[in-house]
Amino acid sequence: MSLVEKCWMVTSKISVIALLMITGIYFGKFVCPYIKKKKGAVAVSIVYITIMLVLYMIPPQIDNFSAYLIGVIAAFLAMYVEDRRNIYQKIFLAITFFSIRWLTVAMAARLDDLVTKALVFRNMSAEKVWLQYGLYVGTRVLDIVLCIAFIAVAIGLINKAYIYKKDEMSVKEMVMLIIPSLVGVTGYGILQYYLMIYERDTGKNLIDTYGFYGALSFLHYLISIVAILVVIVMFQNWKEMQEEQRGQELVLNQISDMKKHIEEVEKSYRDIRSMRHDMGNHIQTLEHLVAHNNIDDATEYLEHLKNEWDEVSPEIKTGSPVIDVILMEKLREAKERQIRFLSDFHYPQNTKLNAFDLSVIMNNALNNCMENVSGDDPYISISSFRKNSIFMITIKNSFGGQLNFGDSDLPETTKSGREHGMGLNNIRRVARMYMGDISLEQGNEEVILSIMMQVE
């Protein structure tokens, strides 16, 4: 083997290895926004590159398609080990990258074929071997540059279009999203199969014989990538519509709660007005009893009057009539169920905090407490404090069971149907409207919900 032939072989191997490493790096970049820690994305790149290099270095036992499939499966397992949440999304990412890798490399190859034929094959002669080699090196560099450009653009557009990266993906959503990738890579396989069959049967290259075949192949690869992107955009638009629908449901819940609270306030107002109307009669009765020295009767009558006043006068005063009504309702429910209800909540005055936004938090949080409170001495407590622009709410309840957090920061609910997990999500949604968030902790047979909001 001559020196120039050795150079050709070494250059070919280096270009393949460089392409393997570059695609591995971009695999990590692709999955990075979907994984909790960046080291998980680094692990994906390392595992993919290592597996592909090992399969490339050992004597060929399997075809390229199977080798890359093994590499992607290994990278998927690394991704799952690093972050076990949202497995269907990880399957989608692995299949999508597998398809994108083949399609972008094939697009670059079609353009590289044109350049190679135009520059290298036109200068085929014994006297120009080093010129041919130099042109070949140039085409290998061009091929790698084109691959980087195509895969970087494809991954960048997909990650930009995929907005709701943290949302849990269902099986149905995964199937819908991977169909374009499967169609694209299947089409690639069919086109390559006909290319191989034609060359085996005729000894000629199909693209050399029919130039339009290369153009059609390039068009198929491009359309396949566009189809993947379009389906993701449509999926994200659908998710956005779901968010808007949930927002509308939240508004409807607020309106429903508002009506209920107004009715309670009106009832309290009617009771107070009725007592004020009868107050003159009560005073005259007490004066009559005292004047005739009926002290025992006067005391009994006064005690009865005090009980009536306690019924219409709220025991809890937070500074907001709306929140007073909510807490009084929960206090009455707690008394009926023999649950201790403790309140040290104070509504922050002169802030941008809307009482009806806060009512969504209070209703959902206290309803969850009422549903889940347990233990020998069941209790619910709510407190608040304000530090400059930050308003904190802490709601606790006794709980003898064990919350199942899974891989999320919020526990999985035992409810089913459309209301599944809506309570805590509604609380978080309102908190985030005020640049805040929530956290839920469990310890010492107690569940603690903390809500932070910025109210100025």
Image: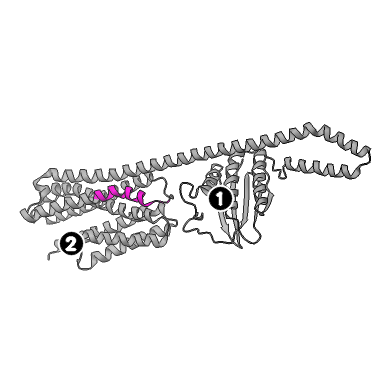
Residue 175 magenta: yes
In the figure, is residue 232 to the left or right of 205? right
- Residue 388 locus on image (x, y percent): 65, 45
Observer-nearest of 424 and 178: 424
Front residue of 138/366: it is: 366
Counting residues from the N terminus, which is met first, the one under dot 2 or under dot 1?
A: 2
Q: Given the image, on which type of amino acid does mark 2 rest?
A: Met
Residues in magenta, as a range: 168-184
Q: What x and y, as percent, mark residue 434?
A: 56, 42
Query: How many marks overall?
Result: 2
Most foreground residue, 333 or 205: 333
Q: Is residue 354 visible?
A: no
Q: What residue sits right under mark 2 in the picture?
A: 9
Q: Position of residue 319 (x, y in %)?
A: 69, 40
Tag of residue 438: 1
Extreme residue in the bottom direction: 58
- On screen, residue 151 versus residue 377, left or right, reads left
